[in-house]
Image (spheres, helix red, strand yellow):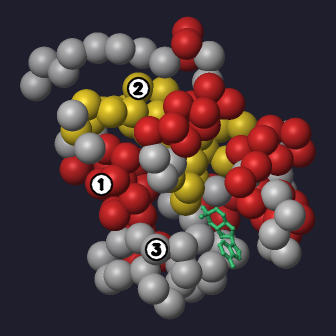
Amino acid sequence: NKERTFLMVKPDGVQRGLIGEIVKRFEQKGFQLVGAKLLQLSREQAELHYGEHLGKDFFERLVNFITSGPVFAMVWEGDEVIALSRAMIGKTSALDAAPGTIRSDFAVHTNFNLIHGSDSPESARREIANFFSDQELVSYTKVI
Ligand code: CMP
């Protein structure tokens, strides 16, 4: 079941020089990168992206953090990429992330958890559209 998902290295991951490490893990897994860009989010874009958390006590902190510096936004394609990339990322809470996941291996704090990944096909569609135009996404068949 070929899918697309939206993954984003958050400002902490960019500042700690972890873009390469994170991209490497998804390449090694066999997923295909079909879109990527470094950008700094506007407040509007961040509030739209985190709309489901509107009204929660951590919302303001979250929006301030995600707009505080550049992020690396990506679209990845592959079989079951939505669920599998979430598994590779690990649980939100630093205490719950399993060893071997990105968050467990590189993060200690729930608020600075390095990377975002879409949690469902609906979220993936919405998030991809929030960050990328159709022209910014490529489509190609892997030859090797
Ligand atoms: P993420 O799931 O990528 O998107 C929402 C973010 O809010 C989450 O990562 C955490 O970094 C942050 N956050 C802070 N406190 C909480 C909380 N209590 N529950 C969920 N997310 C939280």
Ligand 1 neighbours mark 1 (CB distance < 8 Å): no
| Three-letter code, disc 3 | Lys
Circle 3 residue: 91
* Residue type, mark 1 in image: Leu
57 vs 78: above or below:
below
User: Mark 1 highlights which residue?
Assistant: 84
Query: How many C-alpha atoms fall within 10 Å of the one at disc 3: few (<14), some, or many (≥20)?
Result: some
Disc 2 and disc 1: Cα gap in Å?
17 Å
Label 2 beta carbon within 8 A of ligand 1: no
Q: Which residue lies under the disc numbered 2? A: 34
Helix, strand or loop at label 3? It is loop
Distance in Å between CA atoms under marks 1 and 3: 12 Å
N-term mark: 2 or 1: 2
Q: For numbered disc 1, what is the local secondary structure? A: helix
- Tell me if 33 is positioned left or right of 69 in this view: left
Q: Determine whether label 3 and label 2 are within 8 Å by CB.
A: no
Q: Position of residue 6 (x, y in %)?
A: 51, 40
Q: Nearer the viewer, residue 50 or 18?
A: 50
Residue 94 is situated, as x and y percent measured from the top left of the image, at 53, 84
Ligand 1 shows up in the quarter that is bottom right
Label located before the other in sequence (1 or 3): 1
- Residue placed at 29% from the left, 14% from the top? 140
Q: Between 22 and 57, which is closer to the camera in this rendering?
A: 57
- Does 22 sit above or below residue 30? below
Quadrant of image for the N terminus: top left
Looking at the rendered structure, the kind of residue marked 2 is Val
Looking at marks 3 and 2 on the same chain, the residue that comes earlier in the sequence is marked by: 2
